[in-house]
Amino acid sequence: MEKQAMLQDKVMVVTGAGGGIGRDIALALAAEGARVVVNDIGAALGGEGRDAGPAQRVAAEIRQRGGQALVNTDSVASAEGAAAIIAGALQAFGQVDGVVNNAGILRDRIFHKMGEDEWDAVLKVHLYGAYYMSRAVAPHFKERMSGSLLHMTSTSGLIGNLGQANYAAAKLGVVALSKSIALDMQRFQVRSNCIAPFAWSRMTGSIPSQTEAEQARVEKIRQMTPAKIAPLAVFLLSDAARGVNGQVFCVRNNEIFLMSQPRPMRSVQRGQGWTPQTIAEHAMPALQASFVALDRSADVFSWDPV
């Protein structure tokens, strides 16, 4: 007896699906029976320009493999664009079962040199884009009493990285947004989860590779293809993941991590309350052993990918 596809007859919207991680997720969803809305404005890595070609090529790949795909080139960076993406999906397929908030740009700059335009542009696509898309589909999910949202976050936000204050702030904001959606929408059987992906793509192609150490690091990242992210994405969007909600996962080649979320680590108390002086003398020395180090993502994930 042939095994039933995990997403048979479901409709999935994937933003930023014209290349990299989004492309591989879109192809994997289609391979499991989903009808896929392939959204991509075809912009450069910094967000400049428009080109329908990337989305059209991915949709063509899906159709060549016997699947159904709709091309969409609206921008997630506005409420109107997100609404148009969902409206187009509903018009073409009559329903939406899942949304992957994957679209992204980079404007890396050391913090004290970062301009407001670089800050705004990155937050608009990553954080506002995830909000706009989730908000646009929420009434439909509520009405159907089902739906799954999957947001791409990053260890740049979860842990830290140099020169990415805009990207890190947006990506950690996405985690909080996802948790809030999970809490607010669970009564309607709507789930919201995050993946922090390690993968070589256009988004990581700008990593410096001048020194031998940098070149070795880039070579390790190249092993981690976008296709490694897709199986977890398929699972989280399927009915098999109905008990998984409000979680943050990390995928690094063949490794899957469940990431921690902030919880109290250690506490101090004084019955008579605190003064700045007693905080300096008592509270900080007591808490200091549990301080979180100024780690970067590479410091925490210091071993070679499996």
Image (cartoon, helix red, strand yellow):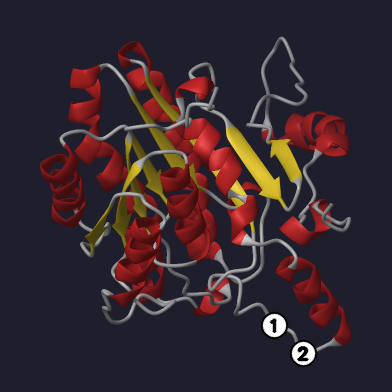
Q: Say which amino acid is labelled 1.
A: Pro
Is residue 191 left or right of 198 when viewed as pictured?
left
Residue closest to the eye, 176 or 229 = 229
Q: Position of residue 203 (x, y in %)?
A: 54, 70
| Residue 210's disc number | 2
The N terminus, quarter of image: top right
Q: Position of residue 11 (x, y in %)?
A: 30, 38
Residue at the image point whose x is 48% and y is 18% from the top: 242
Residue closest to the eye, 96 or 165 = 96
Image position of 297 with respect to 32: above or below: below
CA gap, disc 1 to disc 2?
6 Å
Any part of residue 115 in sight: yes
Query: Given the current orientation, which residue lies at the most extreme front position?
Result: 1
Residue at the image point whose x is 40% and y is 65% from the top: 122
Is residue 88 left or right of 6 when viewed as pictured?
left
Any part of residue 155 in sight: no
| Residue 208's disc number | 1
